[in-house]
Image (spheres, rainbow, N blue to C red):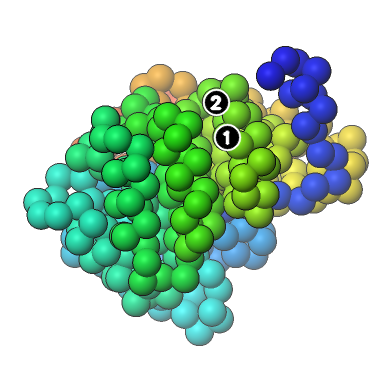
Amino acid sequence: MNLSEVHARRQPGRHPVGMAAVLLPFEENGEIAEEAYVSCLQDTIQAGLIPAVNMDTGYVNLLTDAEKARVLGIVREALGPTGTPFVAGAFIEGQDGDVVDNYRREIARIAEHGGTPILFQTSRLHNLPPGAVVEAYDRATRDVPAAYAFELGKMFAPNGEIWETRVFEGILGIGQIKGAKHSSLDRVIELERLETRDRIRPEFHVFTGNDLGIDMIEYGSDYLLGLAAFSPAKFAERDRLWAAQDPAYLMVADALQWLGNIAFRPPVPAYKHSAATFLHLLGKIPTSKTHPRSPERPAWEREILSDCARRLLLI
């Protein structure tokens, strides 16, 4: 694929499907800030984005089973009466037992709470033949009408893996899997995913997880981003402007990308502290605390994120 072919993919006027991986906030005493979490969920829905919970932004890899269940309970209590859709991570890394059984157990719990599961990768499927990986995903998701897959680069988590093309092609053949998040932070690989999707199953959603290249929506990706949790309303504004082919899109998109470049700099997992600092700065959550096992940013983070907020006209 050359640059002319890349530019030919741009789709002005397209309205992407947007999902925000909601940050899990904490109180000063280290407990989950449940009221603030509900408020963040509501902000996401009011913006027209789909909330994604128990994701990396929600510390799914660090939560206990009881904490993950409590998050699902909070979401069901907050969204259940409205029937609002949400996505939730099915995370099994470190669990003993059969991989498919473990996935099915997590998927069942998510479905019981009204959510659509997205399957985090497990290192136990790394380096297996493509057919074995595809079969595991097929068997794991057979009991639900819809699920999502997830390619996660190792810069985010060691259990992640960017699949070889044959695995992705196989995932496209699983009817109950309606889309996949792609988090390689590599535009070329994501463009190849889009090209493969268009050829084999055009209705399949490729959700960009590239917080360093959020303009992938211009080329046919939808999105599921931790960055969208910083300001769902601004992402919704950006999407509307792109759909309307309004040149004001450029200013909003540039300001959001500036925020993404700062928040998702190495070490990448520390972006959650950036998110907590940003949302605390805006008065959305009670503290900038993160999960105690999550890496943190330096003390000057608040100052540079204040500049990002001003550029986005949020303060």
At x 53% / y 69%, what residue is drawn? 85
The location of residue 99, given as percent across then percent down, is 20, 52
Please, what secondary structure does the residue beneath circle 2 have? helix
Disc 1 target residue: 193
The location of residue 54, given as percent across then percent down, is 36, 55
Disc 2 target residue: 189
Q: Are marks 2 and 1 in contact (CB under 8 Å)?
A: yes
User: Which of 31/98 is in front?
Assistant: 98
Crowd class of label 1 (few under 14; some 14 to 19; many from 20; radius 10 Å): some
User: Which of 126/112 is in front?
Assistant: 126
At x 60% / y 29%, what residue is drawn? 192
Q: Is residue 43 left or right of residue 161?
A: right
The location of residue 231, given as percent across then percent down, is 60, 47
At x 48% / y 31%, what residue is drawn? 165
Q: Quadrant of residue 157?
A: top left
Which quadrant does the C terminus fall into?
top right
